[in-house]
Image (cartoon, rainbow, N blue to C red):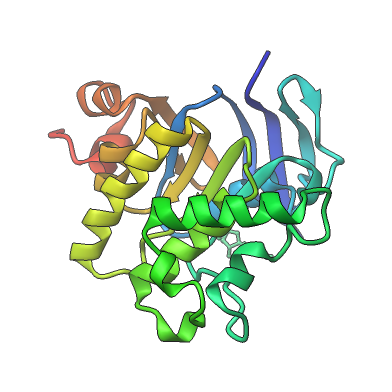
Amino acid sequence: MSGLELRNIVKNFGAVEVIRDVSLAVNDGEFIAFVGPSGCGKSTLLRLIAGLDKPTGGSIAIDGADVTAIGAADRGLAMVFQSYALYPHMSVRENLAFGLENTKVAKAEIEARITDAARMLEIEPFLQRRPGQLSGGQRQRVAIGRAIVRRPDAFLLDEPLSNLDAELRVSMRAELAALHARLKATMIYVTHDQVEAMTLANRIVVLRGGRIEQVGTPLELYNKPANRFVAGFIGAPH
Ligand code: ADP
Ligand code: MG
């Protein structure tokens, strides 16, 4: 099979079971959103997919190959965090190049990718600036650009818009949709904002207490919520 497959994933922190038997298949090119209240395990699940953390039980496969024991750098995925995680002492250009410089990617290719991503995200005028000299929206674009230049098979985005004001959040939403249409890469998008999930995702995974409550298209969740929790969270009449 191609894509990403989670099989019976469990994650414990000490005695606390934070992810409880999560199984899910994500198709190549899909825009899938993980939604659920704060503390339900969204970020933990994303970190397990990224390889930043190891599951206590279960397995993860990418394109049919078991990657459960493989580290983040070798999974072909790129993560974008809510906090941007940019290096404050480096220029935007250096932030974009960072992490590619000690790889097999040739210098000219790195330059070409930076130019391409900067154009796509309209951050070309800011390449020499430092993150501190940018607005929140510009910083978030740089964080996304840093993922794009790595040419990942999948983007893992953890509440990437939640630090932005409401107006910017809506316009960035449209930009993310356009980006997905252009790159055709898989996007796994964590948010606690159901409206964001409903407008962006092909499929939504609703989590509660470390378990999947329901998986479906926005319309399926809206029209046929599996239970009162999903109905309440998605905002359908119930
Ligand atoms: P969400 O992203 O949905 O808000 P998280 O995945 O961050 O939720 O957290 C899920 C649960 O796991 C929470 O109860 C949180 O306190 C706990 N948790 C997350 N990371 C750790 C950790 N490194 N050590 C201990 N507990 C953790
Ligand atoms: Mg989180």
Along the line of sight, the residue nearer the viewer: 69 or 117: 117
* Residue 155, above or below 39: above
Q: Residue furthest right?
A: 69
| Residue occupying image coordinates x 51% and y 78% | 128
Taking the spot 32% from the left edge, 30% from the top edge, the residue there is 227
Q: Residue 13 falls in which quadrant of the image? A: bottom right
Tell me if I can see residue 51 in this picture. Answer: yes
Residue occupying the far front of the picture: 108
Residue 93 pos. (x, y %): 57, 70
Relative to the observer, which residue lies in front, 35 or 100?
100
Left or right of 148? Residue 191 is: left
How many discs appear?
Answer: 0
Q: Is residue 41 visible?
A: no
- Residue at screen point 39% across, 71% down: 125
The percent coordinates of residue 238 (x first, y second) are 16, 33
Q: Quadrant of the N terminus?
A: top right
Q: Which residue lies at the image location 32% right of the left edge and 39% below the top edge?
A: 200
Of residues 198 and 41, which is closer to you in this image? 198
Horizontal relation, residue 100 to residue 177: left or right? right
- Image vertical order of residue 80 relative to residue 88, above or below: above
Q: Quadrant of ligand 1?
A: bottom right
> Could you say which is closer to the camera, residue 91 or residue 187?
91
- For residue 223, side relative to residue 14 (left or right): left
